[in-house]
Image (spheres, helix red, strand yellow):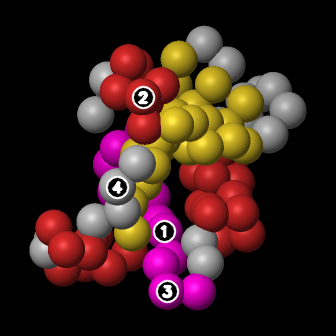
Amino acid sequence: MLDIAAATVLAQDFLDRQVSHEGMTFALAEGESVRVGAAFYFDCQSTAFLSSGDLRDMAVGTGYVCVDGDTGECRQLGAVESAGLDFF
């Protein structure tokens, strides 16, 4: 079973490799994580928005990053699924 520190590293690596693209990079929102059962959930947003707070920099339609605490597998949830969980 992963701990929060290992899950955080996997989640950011997932964002770097699978979600970020030229023109918009993503980062985990500081302090916005929760463990539910064996899964860790992290809120994320564009690095531009996290540093500026300007709504024009906000990524819209993205959801939480989920890390399976047993396997380390990561996936990004959709906005609707994330809104239904309403963690943050």
Q: Nearer the viewer, mark 3 or mark 1?
A: 3
User: Dot 1 corresponds to which residue?
Assistant: 26
Hey, what amino acid is under mark 1?
Phe
Q: Please report whichever mark, 2 or 1, sits nearer to the chain's N-terminal start.
A: 1
Distance from Cα at disc 3 to Cα at disc 1 = 10 Å
**Tag on residue 86?**
none
**Tag on residue 80?**
2
Distance from Cα at disc 3 to Cα at disc 4 = 14 Å
Q: Secondary structure at mark 3?
A: loop
Residue 34's image quarter?
top left
- Image location (x, y in percent) of residue 88: 28, 34
Q: Do tag 3 and tag 1 residues touch (Cβ < 8 Å)?
A: no
Q: Secondary structure at mark 1?
A: strand
Q: Secondary structure at mark 4?
A: loop
Q: Which residues are magenta?
A: 22-34
User: Dot 3 corresponds to which residue?
Assistant: 23
Hey, what amino acid is under mark 2?
Val
Hey, what amino acid is under mark 4?
Val
Distance from Cα at disc 3 to Cα at disc 2 = 24 Å
Q: Is residue 59 left or right of residue 50?
A: right
Hey, what amino acid is under mark 3?
Gly
User: Dot 4 corresponds to which residue?
Assistant: 60
